[in-house]
Structures are given as C-alpha cells and as structure tokens.
Amino acid sequence: MPRLEPAMARIRVKDLRLRTYIGIKEEEILNKQDVLINLTILYPASDAVRGNDIDQALNYRTITKAIIQHVEENRFALLERLTQEVLDLVMQQPQVRYAEVEVDKPHALRFAESVSITLAAHRD
C-alpha cells in the first residue's frame, strides 16, 4: 500500500469586514474605515480527520477573534503593515504550514472598488 501524505486542510475566511484606523491623510487618521480581510491557511489535518476531535483541528474561530481584536484596537498608516500584522497573528499558530492574507481597503482610489495587499508566509 503506498504511503499517503498527511491530509492538508485549506481554511478560507472570506470577507471578514472590520473597522479600523488606516491611512495617512487627516480624514483617515480621525475616522475608522472598513477593511475586508481574506485568509487562506493550510495545516496538516490528518489527526482531525481521523479522530473527529476539535482538539486536533486548527481553531479558526480563535484565530479570527484575535485578528478582530488586533485590527479594531490599533491604528495603521499603511495597508502593508496591517496585512503583515494579521499574517503574524496567523503564523503564531504552530500547526499552520502556509498562510496568505489579503486586506482590501474599499474605495481607496476614486475609480476603483478597492485596493488590496496580499502577503504570504510558510514554514517547513
């Protein structure tokens, strides 16, 4: 029987809408704005699949709650910085093998729906 690789789970959190201070203009510094956060997280899920036990799974609710608290309680001049800090929060979980974070700032440009930054990280 061939040796199978561990099952890799791909968790996606789509359009997490939060409000924070983001930007460098006076209006942006004084007023919270919407941001949309999209996450893609890969982690080995063999134990969770086999055992059907929450303790063996990556708890995306815990990760999302930490992101909400961090984003809503801080100020960011740059979208890049906000994106990196969210990515750092995700990568704090030792089970995570790969994470990609995209942060959209709606209506950041006059004729565009939004502007986004995407950053990714992985561990072996």
Image: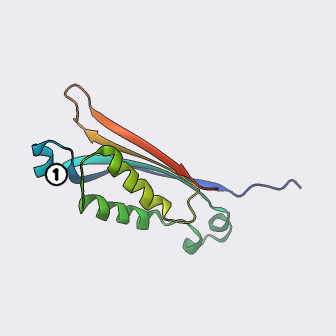
Relative to the observer, which residue lies in front, 33 or 1?
A: 33
The x, y position of residue 30, in whole percent, is 10, 51
Rendered location of residue 54, percent (x, y): 55, 72
What is the residue that sits farthest to the top in this orientation? 111
Q: If the image is split into quadrants, where does the N terminus sit?
A: bottom right
Binning the other alpha carbons within 10 Å of mark 1 as few (below 14), some (14 to 19) or many (20 upward) gives some
Residue at point 33%, 51% (across, down)? 82
Instruction: Give the image location of residue 58, x and y in percent.
Output: 53, 65
Q: Amino acid at mark 1?
A: Lys
85 in relation to 52, above or below: above
Residue found at x 86% / y 53%: 2
Give the labeled residue for mark 1.
32
Asked if residue 31 can be seen in this view, the reply is: no
Q: Is residue 1 depicted above or below 53 in this figure?
A: above
Q: Residue at x 39, y 61 (%)?
A: 64
84 left or right of 70? right
Task: Name the quarter where the C terminus is drawn.
Answer: bottom right
- Residue 28 in percent (x, y) is at 15, 45
Work out whether residue 59 can be spotted.
yes
Residue 87 lies, with reference to residue 65, above or below; the image says above
Instruction: Give the residue drawn at x 58%, y 64%.
Output: 95
Name which quarter of the figure residue 96 lies in. bottom right
Q: Is residue 34 left or right of residue 14?
A: left
